């Protein structure tokens, strides 16, 4: 498959993830907006699976998890169930976990640092944020009030879109402090995401450089 096709596929994945993240704070408060967000999630799932074409094992694992994710999300429109929410978040974690490992493996393979690889590396970073977003929602669903939002009433629950914001600022180690973990489990998860964000940049850059150097040696 041509490099142009690979680059385009990686760009589609990155665009779908960015679009879903940008829409989240604006559409998550009403029914129609939730429908649009779920559709954008499905697009992200499909583009992630397509990007994993070169990693068959992780691609099939992602497909196996994506199917119940779609079914659970659809069921959530007709049956508002706490059990469905608790089932949905581990499935999302599994999907983005498999997809992230598959992309990480792809980035470590020998080859030139193409535009597609750059797109894939940014997509992987955003998928890590999605993984922890699902983990935080799962934690809040099982242990309510694991997180607190500055300026909100003590009994107010942190809204679901806020966890995506919290995941992104934690992954980037910005940490504004307006959403904070208050239980031991939530604090440990947030700490691990901060470590993952720092380590990702260092490891990914090293793997890309090593892959490029290996490709150069093979050409000599």
Image: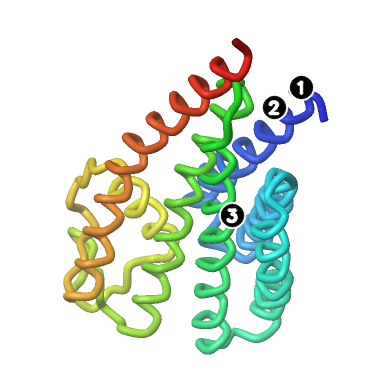
Q: Which mark is residue 187?
A: none
Front residue (pair 212, 39): 212
Whole-angstrom CA distance, mark 2 to mark 1, is: 5 Å
Sequence-earlier tag: 3 or 1: 1
Whole-angstrom CA distance, mark 3 to mark 2, is: 17 Å
Residue 137 rendering spot, x and y as whole percentages: 41, 70
Could you say whether the residue bearing mark 1 is in a helix, strand or loop?
helix
Name the residue carrying label 3: 99
Name the residue carrying label 1: 4
Could you say whether the residue bearing mark 3 is in a helix, strand or loop?
helix
Color style of the picture: rainbow
Residue 65 rendering spot, x and y as whole percentages: 66, 70
Quadrant of the rendered structure where residue 35 is?
A: bottom right
Quadrant of the rendered structure where residue 217 is?
A: top right
Name the residue carrying label 2: 7
**Side of 199 relative to 8 (left or right):** left
Circle 3 packing at 10 Å, graded few (<14), some (14-19), many (20+), is many
Residue 152 rendering spot, x and y as whole percentages: 22, 65
Decide: marks 2, 1 in contact (CB < 8 A)? yes
Residue drawn 54% across the image and 40% down it: 123
Residue 12 rendering spot, x and y as whole percentages: 69, 36
Quadrant of the rendered structure where residue 31 is?
A: bottom right
Residue drawn 63% across the image and 36% down it: 15
Whole-angstrom CA distance, mark 3 to mark 1, is: 22 Å
């Amino acid at each position: 498959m041509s490099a142009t096709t690979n680059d385009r596929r990686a760009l589609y994945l990155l665009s779908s993830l960015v679009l879903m993240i940008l829409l989240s704070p604006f559409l998550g408060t009403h029914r129609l907006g939730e429908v649009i967000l779920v559709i954008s999630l499905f697009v992200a799932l499909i583009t992630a699976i397509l990007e994993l074409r070169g990693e068959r094992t992780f691609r099939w694992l992602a497909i196996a998890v994506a199917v119940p994710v779609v079914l659970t999300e659809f069921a959530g429109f007709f049956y508002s169930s706490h059990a469905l929410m608790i089932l949905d978040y581990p499935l999302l974690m599994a999907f983005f976990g498999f997809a992230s490992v598959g992309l990480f493996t792809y980035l470590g393979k020998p080859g030139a640092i193409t535009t597609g690889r750059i797109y894939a590396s940014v997509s992987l970073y955003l998928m890590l944020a999605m993984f922890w977003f699902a983990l935080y929602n799962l934690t809040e669903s099982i242990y309510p009030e694991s997180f607190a939002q500055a300026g909100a009433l003590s009994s107010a629950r942190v809204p679901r879109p806020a966890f995506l914001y919290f995941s992104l600022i934690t992954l980037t180690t910005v940490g504004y402090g307006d959403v904070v973990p208050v239980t031991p489990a939530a604090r440990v998860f947030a700490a691990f995401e901060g470590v993952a964000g720092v380590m990702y940049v260092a490891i990914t850059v090293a793997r890309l450089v090593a892959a490029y150097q290996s490709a150069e040696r093979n050409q000599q």
